[in-house]
Image (cartoon, grey):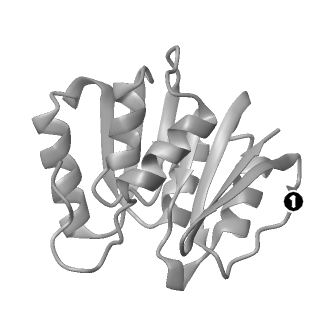
Amino acid sequence: MKAVPGNSTRPTTDKVKEAIFNIIGPYFDGGICLDLFAGSGGLGIEAISRGVEKAIFVDRDGKAIGTIRDNIKTCSLEDVTEVYRNDAARALKAIIKRELAFDYIFLDPPYAKQQLKDILETVDSHSLLKENGVIVCEHGTDVKLPAVVGRLQQVKSETYGIITISIYTY
C-alpha cells in the first residue's frame, strides 16, 4: 500500500493497526465501515480484507484522496468502496442525509485538530453506529476521551507509545 506523499498525514503504524484488529475482531462477517480521516485508506482497506463488505473513505486532503484511490485500485476494491474529498463535519452531514449507519467507524484525525468528542456526539445523536457496531478512535496519549458520550460507552483503551486507541460501543 502506498502512503500519502509529504507529511500532511500520519499513517497508522502496522503495530497499531494489528492491535486495533486484534481488539475489535480479526475477521468480520460482512458489514459496512466508515474511515473518516482516511489518509491512505489503510484501516478501511484492512477491514475489507478481513470481511467487511463495503467501506466509505473520507479525507479532506487531495493527496490523500489520490492515494486512497490508488490503493483501492491496487487491491481491486472499486466495487465495494466509496471515496469522498470532504471535511469530517460536512461528510457526517451528508451521511446523515443518506440515513446510513455503520458497523465500524474508524476515527484517526490529525492530532493537532482533535474533534473526537464532537464526532462521537454526532454519531450518537444521529444513530450513525449500528446496534452492535464499534468505533475506533486513534489519538495522542495527551488526549483524554470521556468514558461515556451519550449512549456510547468506552469499552477499551490501549496505549502504544505516543498513540492511544479508544474503543466505543453502545
Q: Residue at x 58, y 28 (%)?
A: 25
**Residue 73 higher or lower than 88, as above or below:** above
Taking the spot 15% from the left edge, 27% from the top edge, the residue there is 76
Residue 40 placed where, x, y %?
27, 56
Tell me what residue is drawn at x 49 percent, y 16 percent.
Answer: 30
Give 99 or 127, whichever is nearer the viewer.
127
Above or below, 124 relative to 164: above
Q: What amino acid is at disc 1?
A: Ala
Q: Count of labels shown?
A: 1
Residue 104 x, y percent position in the rendering: 57, 37
The answer to whether residue 101 is visible is no
Q: Is residue 105 left or right of residue 16?
A: right
Q: Residue 127 falls in which quadrant of the image?
A: top right
Q: Within 10 angstroms of label 1, few (less than 14), some, or many (20 or more) residues?
A: some
For the C terminus, give its image quadrant.
Answer: top right
**Mark 1 = which residue?**
147
Residue 94 point in image, percent of width and height: 51, 50
Give the camera-side residue of 118 and 15: 15
Q: Secondary structure at mark 1?
A: loop
